[in-house]
Amino acid sequence: MKTGLALFLLLPLPLFGQLLEESSRVAIPVKGTTVVVYAMVDCAHCYYYLPPALHISQRQDTQVLEASFISWEPEGGSPAGGIFHVLTDWGLPARGEDSVQRKLRARYDSLAVLSGPAVVRAADEGVRIVGKDNLTTILTRSVQRAQVPPSTPGARMALSFRFDADGVQEFKRCLRDPDSVTATLAVTYYYRLRSAHGAVLDRPVTLQLPFKTILKQLNVTP
Amino acid sequence: MKKILCVCITILTVLGVQTVYSQKVMLDEPVKAGPLTVFPDVSDKNAYYYVTDKPRIATAANGKPKFSFLKYVDNNAANKEGDGGGLVHAVVVLEVTDEHRKLAERELQRIKPGAILKGPILFTDGTIALISSIANKDGEFTKQVLGIGKAPILDGHQAAISVLLNKQGAKILWESFKTPTPDMSVSFEMTMQGYRSPKRVKIEANFEQIYESTVFQAAAAVNGPVLLSGEINSTFEDMRKSGAIKVEQYGEDEDLEKALETAYSKLTSMMFDPASGTGSPNLGQLGASAGVGGTSLLDRATTRLNEERNSARTQNAAIRAENRTAADRRSAAATTTSTAGTTSTAGTSTTSTTGSTTTGGTDASLRDDVRIGPRRAMDVSAGYTGGSNVSGPAEIPQVDVPSISIVASYQMKKVRQSGKFSIDLNKYTVDNLVMRFDENFGQIKCTDCFREANLEDPLYVQRDVFAYLDGFNSEDFGKYINFANVTVRKKHEGGDVTNQEIRIDKTNFNTTGNTFKVIYGWKNDADRAKWLDYDYKVAWNYFGGFTEESPWITTSMGSVPVSSPYVRKMLDIEADPAVFEEKGVRSAEVKVTYTLGGKEQVRNFRLDPKKTLSGQIDLLMPAQALAYEYEINWILKTGKTISTGKLPGTSSLIFADNL
């Protein structure tokens, strides 16, 4: 049990880095989500927000969600298969940042300036697919590349999944019944806080994007 | 003294090196300016540099994307479907558009009035990769992937990527490019160099005093305990309070905690090694009870983790209480609205059917560090076209309760440091920042960029023309034909002439099995139908030196039927012995004459009743004709000769007894 609680890791903690004041934490609701904002330790009226959520990326020119799925039937000795490609990102749009800053000034600090997202460092484990359903297993074994996730807002992260015939069948089943899907894309970041006692803390924040959300928004062309 | 000098040089190298790098940006103070992430200049806090993190397909001078997808087929007569594949070539540019720059400048003014955007940050290094199941290097669908690896590091510079696909890969990727998000994204991992904030703090310590600490003395013993980084820092902190570690601070606003953290980190690295070489203790070290305070390393780490978790949970309890109060207020307001009979739904719902996260989650690995996200992933995205059913303010998210204790463990070095430790943090320190950003190729709006091609190139095509001797066998060569010469002439559209020749004689007739071939190729023959046309002629050389040559014949057939204009015809000569006996004929001679190539040819046959009165002579005649002259001379037993004189003959049989 103890080993389950206390894992010893040697993380590459930088000598320096942006330090946020734990006591300055405020949570500001914006358009159905809540943005957590901290003041920076050595900068008066400078505020930074934590990564709010993972999204499916949208193309800037067409506003089309960046996700696609294609599958093929067996042909000429080649088995059936499929490919699912999706891009994700996190961050607040400019209007969202304006809104947060307005509320920050109105409620907490009249001179507050929301400078952007907090400096975060992705956990070494990178992108994870968590869940307990069959799709979780299939997605985990099918992902072609799992790099270190982006640490800046708006930076996209592409994921490509190569399904075999069974994977295609399961994915199609989940498309018909997305609410049954528990598979979730998860990325953990760390940010640095100075506690009220002066200690420097590395705090995790995990962003999630349930696959059922993706599947509901995925247009599959027959 | 030398050791002190070495220590000082090491510290200065690590912390104080000022590079010749001309751009000096502050890594600690990034600003999100519209679509761009910008960093302030070290010396001019009103000057900002932006990160070039908007890769896209480069555009040619004619406005078309620098992209091509060639799907090709190579005809294969042996199979129903030809061989083939695909070749994707793309030029990717790392560039920020003017529009992005203007948006960033405008947003920067909101954040910091008077600030200016000076230009792009120069990356020091970077890599480019493809994220694709199809165009995956060494994947099942590719033959070769070129161009990945080193990325362009300057704004506006381009990188070329080329992917050679097999047939199935080409088919699938071709279909994928019909979707808005094809299975081809480019991924950059770029390194930028910058500076961390300076601290006007000077820290000095005497190693002799540091080693006198009880904790460090125990750690220095043989098989001494492994120390947690927190325990080491705590010991340093005690020394600072006792004056063993001296801190000089030049300004009141400096972040002393960060400065001390830096100094402690340096002292730790000089005095200790990471446990087991990595900082992760082995199982023996974890459970060893001998340690600080007589407790094991695991116990001490667990205590530290629990302290952090309790702190977070206490904070979360307060947040939950606040959320409950807010929910009650909203509920009361909704009831009031409902009672008043309004139909508005605003402010009554904070739940969603498509929520992106759930508190606690269902997976053990997420239970404690789950971040409460938005009710709907796209609700906060600019330009999201889908409807949102979330109208009220969301709950305040709780802080993340750490599930792991991020602590490193150390063992004291065998070699002791000596002398004074001094670190002056009043300088900017160089550091690197690695940034990742991906971009999908998207739908390429360029019909010219997608081509399907059959690789049958006329340049490489050759025409085979076969020749067969029609109705002949090798016996004919031995009896009247010396050889046949077939000449093929191809007059190409461009004016070139190809001449090919075959000599057919008895020897190669037998060895080739009566199959002869000549070829001609492609020489600017634009008209593929006319390219098939050619001329041929056949020259025959017969026994006796007679030669017959056909005129040029034009044909487009793949085979040339070679038939001799002259054939060997047999003329039978018969006589009745009874007539010869009755007429007293001793012998007879049949003389056949015919013309071949303008020359008279003569054949003789003698009839002798004692030997034979039947025989054949062969004549070389045009295939469709039989015409000759003949004369029979009978020599009687009386010595008298009787002659028929020259008679015309068209029959293949001469009766030589009608005297």
Image (tube, coloured by chain):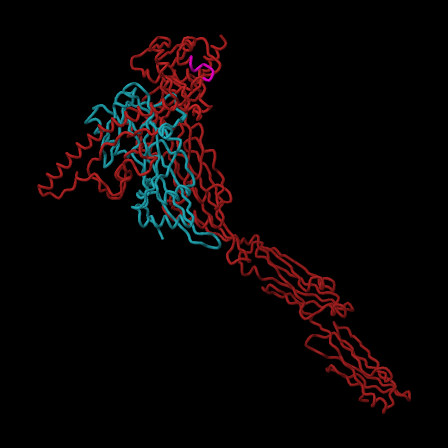
Chain colours: A cyan, B red
Task: Residue at the far bottom: name it.
Answer: B582
The residue under the point 29% across, 12% down is B252
Q: Is residue B200 left or right of residue B141?
A: left
As rendered, which of B642 and B34 lies closer to the eye?
B34
As rendered, which of B28 and A167 lies closer to the eye?
A167
Residue A214 picture location, percent across and down: 32, 43
Residue B109 picture location, percent across and down: 27, 27
Residue B561 picture location, percent across and down: 64, 67
Quarter of the view holding residue B609: bottom right
As rendered, which of B37 and B81 lies closer to the eye?
B81
Placement of B342 over or under B407, stated as above or below: below
* Magenta stretch holds residue B218: yes
Residue A57 picture location, percent across and down: 33, 39
Placement of B354 over or under B81, stated as above or below: above
Q: Please indicate, yes or no, whether residue B17 appears anywhere in the rendered image.
A: no
Q: Which image quarter is the N terminus of chain A in?
A: top left
How many numbered discs, if any? 0
The residue under the point 8% across, 41% down is B340
Q: Please indicate, yes or no, whether residue A38 appears anywhere in the rendered image.
A: yes
Residues drawn in magenta: B217-223
Q: Is residue B602 left or right of residue A122?
A: right
* Magenta stretch holds residue B55: no
The residue under the point 46% across, 38% down is B160
Quarter of the view holding residue B538: bottom right
Task: Residue at the far right: name it.
Answer: B638
